Every structure is written in structure tokens, then in C-alpha cells.
Image (cartoon, rainbow, N blue to C red):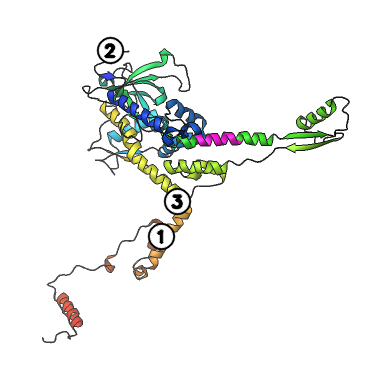
Amino acid sequence: MSDNTTDDEAYELTAEDLAGIQLRTMLADSLGKQYGGDRDLYDAFGWIKDPDIEDFYAMYLRNPYGRAVVDMPAATTWRDGPDLSDEEASGADESTEFEDDVATFVEEQRAWHYCKRADKLAGIGEFGLLVIGFADGKDLVQPVDEAKLDGDPEKDVDWLRPFSQKSVDTLRTGDATSGRWGEPIYYKLDLGDEDDQTAEASTQVWVHHSRVVHIAENLLDDEVRGTPRQEPVLNPLFDIEKTMGAAAEMAYRGADYGLAVNVDKDYDLQDGGEKMEKEMQNFIHGFSKTLQLEAADVEQIGGNDIDPTPIINPEIEALSAYTGIPQSVLKGNETGERATSEDLKEWYGKITERRTQFAGPTIVRELIDRLRKFDVVADPSGDGYELDWPALAEQSELDESEVMVNRAQIIKFVQSMLAEYGTAEVTEFIEDGEFPEVEAAGAVPELDEDDEEVEAYFQERVAESSGTPAGADD
């Protein structure tokens, strides 16, 4: 490893990290204890008290609901990437240098694609990484050398690559005097396949934090490690796994029925039952539809139906309650149950909040600001830039028709104004919501208070309101 990582500036575990680990261990040990420790629910139900990245990764790879809990928030968030615009030039006809540079980088490096993958991988464990391959000719362990970059978004970045916590062999954080107290300084990564259990030394490299976008969601008392997306629902995930496996085994045993052959006690099997055995085997394996057995009765054993739904459904409800993913979305359309518009509206609301509170600041801005720092992309011409995420869903034909009906009802209540407008203007309002401007003929003109006609009109209105004829003496 390079001399850049001295013991004075970096530690693999700080005292705060050790205290956190000890606290988590104590809390994990107390989980599920009842009756003074005489009953341990976690042992009884086969739940893991202190799961690690290996447990979460295995659940992600093999359990369909475990993968859904991790992937669905990221997949919906990054259904479409955000548009970045210069605040100073917002609404301008021509794009700014900042906007052009960002657009070039996003297209050349497929940035939102890699952000989506990094988001998924970050949710498996406590954090994930998006490593930026700056084209500065330096080893990954060294800080980015801005002087070696050209200031060109097409040339200054060679690649992007996402990693999960499983690929991080060592995480070194800074001490109180390093300027990055408790924050990562170096990552030791395994650049091999994450499914490969035998990492070779040649595939392990140290990476400097300036080349890494650190992604952690659901942070609590730690700025580096968040809560894995599966952790709060890990017990239901295990229960679903056990139930599905048990149901499959019971279904197999039930479907694989047996046959009981009752031979008459007075019947003499001269061949030792070989003929009867051959007849039975032909029936079972040769798909024969009949059995010709002398002096014997055949009775079917087993073949019961197994329905795991009453057990699995409450577990799916638990997954939905925590994650906010509608049950119908978790189950999929194959069940015949489609997500209602209300379910999707609530889910999309959560994703909109996730875009604003997590994906935007933690992934997009961290990536773009890192590129700005090393002049890969130009700075905005104003004070900053805006993120504009595309809508998650377009209105259906039914929704659009309901909007038009509402607009038509509005027109119905302003019939007195329709004389001012033609059919074309009314139709435009019903279809597009563009209300016609009030014409001058329908507006109240500005009046000159010194005008004699205006004064006479004013006096006439006053007289009418008081019951005194105009022109009469007081």
C-alpha cells in the first residue's frame, strides 16, 4: 500500500466505531429474550440476531421478496434520470456550459444507469460506493490530480463502477486531526466478481476517497453506515422463505402419493410377488392407467393440497408496512391483483420524497459536485443548479377525461361569461385548462374622477341608494 496512508491520519476502526459495535452486539444478544432469558424467540424461530453483509447478500440473491425490498425503491427512483439546469439561466432558450458538460458526461458514461446500480448495491448492506475512474494517470490509492485532467467531460473520466459493502474489505476513517474525523479516507476493494468467494491479492486495491461517492441510506447515529433495507424486515423474509420451502416440500410429498396393496391372506404368491411388483412399477413409472392384481385391493395414500397463502400474506403485509411498497406490487401482476391508483399514488409520493431527500443530494449532487471540484464540468453561471425529476406516471385516459369533465362543470357555472367568448376558446379551456383572457369590453374601465359625466353617474347611484331623486336639494 502507498505511504499516503499513515497511522497518524487513518484508522481501520475508531473508538466510536468500536463503541457502536459493542452496543449493537449487546442489543442483538438481548433480542427475543423472554422470561428472564429462559425463552429465546430468535433461536426458536431460526432468526439471525446479528446479521452481516453475507446474510443480506445471500437473501438478496435467493429470496424474491428480499430482492424486491432492495431493488424496487431504486428502480422506481431511477425510472428516469433527473434533468440538471443552471439556476441563473433557468428558462433560457440556450443551454449553459454547465448544462452542456453535464449532458455530455451523463451520455458518455451512462451516469444514471450506474447511479441506479450503485443505489441497489448500497441497499444490500450498510453502504455502497460509486467509484469514478478519473483519467489522471494516477493509482487509485492517490488523490485525484486535477492538473492531469483536461477539463473535458468526454476525456477526464474513463469509467464508473458501483460496489456493495461486500466488496469493501477494509474501510479506513480519519482521526480528529485529519480533517475527515470519522469519515472514510481509504477503501480496500475487491475488484473481482462479488459472487467470487476467493479474492486474489491482485484484484484487491486501495482507493482514495476523492475517487469515491459514498452512498448510505437510512442513517441514524453514524454518518458512514446506514441501515440495510432488508434488516427491519429480515424476520418476515426468513419466515416467507421457511413457509415457501415447507409448502413446496409438503406439496411434493402430497403429490407424490403412495399405494397400499392389501393381499388376501389366503392367496399364495407363488413367485414371491414379483409379478405384482412389476405391475405396480409399470403403473407408477410407465403411465399405465390400469392395475391387474389378483386377490389384492389397492388404496391410495396421501395427495393432499397445500395452501401457504394464509401464512405468507401476513408476512407480505409486514414487508409492505415498513417499505411502503404496495402489496399488489410486491406480489406482482401474476397474482391477478393489480395495484390501485391510490396505492400507486402513495408509493410514488414516497419515491418523490426519496428522490428529494436521498437520491438527489446523496448520489446526484455528490457525483456532479465531485466533477465540478476537479473542473471536469464547468460551474453553474449562477449560485447553483436545480434537479428536476420527471413525473413517475402520466395521467391515464380516465384521469384526463375526469379533468375535462371538471372543467366543463366550471364553464357551466360561468354561463354569463360565455357570451364574451367563442366556442373555440371554451373548447380550449376544457381540453387544456387555458382560460381565455378577459376582453376589454367585459372589464371595468379606468375612470377620471374629474369627468362631469362620471360625477353625474356617481351622484345618480348615490341618490338611488338613499331614495332621493337626482338633482333634488338636500
Residue 354 found in image quarter: top left
The verdict on residue 186 being magenta is: no
Question: Residue 36: x, y in percent?
Answer: 41, 34
Q: Please state which of residues 35 and 122 is positioned toward the viewer in this rendering.
A: 35
Mark 2 and mark 1: span between their CA atoms?
Answer: 71 Å
Residue 342, which numbered label? 3
Question: Residue 457: x, y in percent?
Answer: 18, 78
Q: Are marks 2 and 1 in contact (CB under 8 Å)?
A: no
Quadrant where the N terminus sits is top left
Judged from the image, the secondary structure of the residue bearing numbered disc 3 is helix
State which mark lies toward you, 1 or 3: 3
Question: Residue 204: x, y in percent?
Answer: 39, 16
| Left or right: 315 in relation to 122 | right
Q: Amino acid at mark 3?
A: Glu
Mark 1 vs 3, N-terminal side: 3
| Left or right: 91 in relation to 161 | left
Q: From this view, report whether residue 239 is shown above or below residue 439.
A: above
Q: Amino acid at mark 2?
A: Asp
The residue indicated by pointer 2 is 3
Q: Amino acid at mark 1?
A: Ile
Residue 430, which numbered label? 1
Looking at the rendering, the stretch of residues picked out in magenta corresponds to 238-247
Mark 2 vs 1, N-terminal side: 2
Q: Are marks 3 and 2 in contact (CB under 8 Å)?
A: no
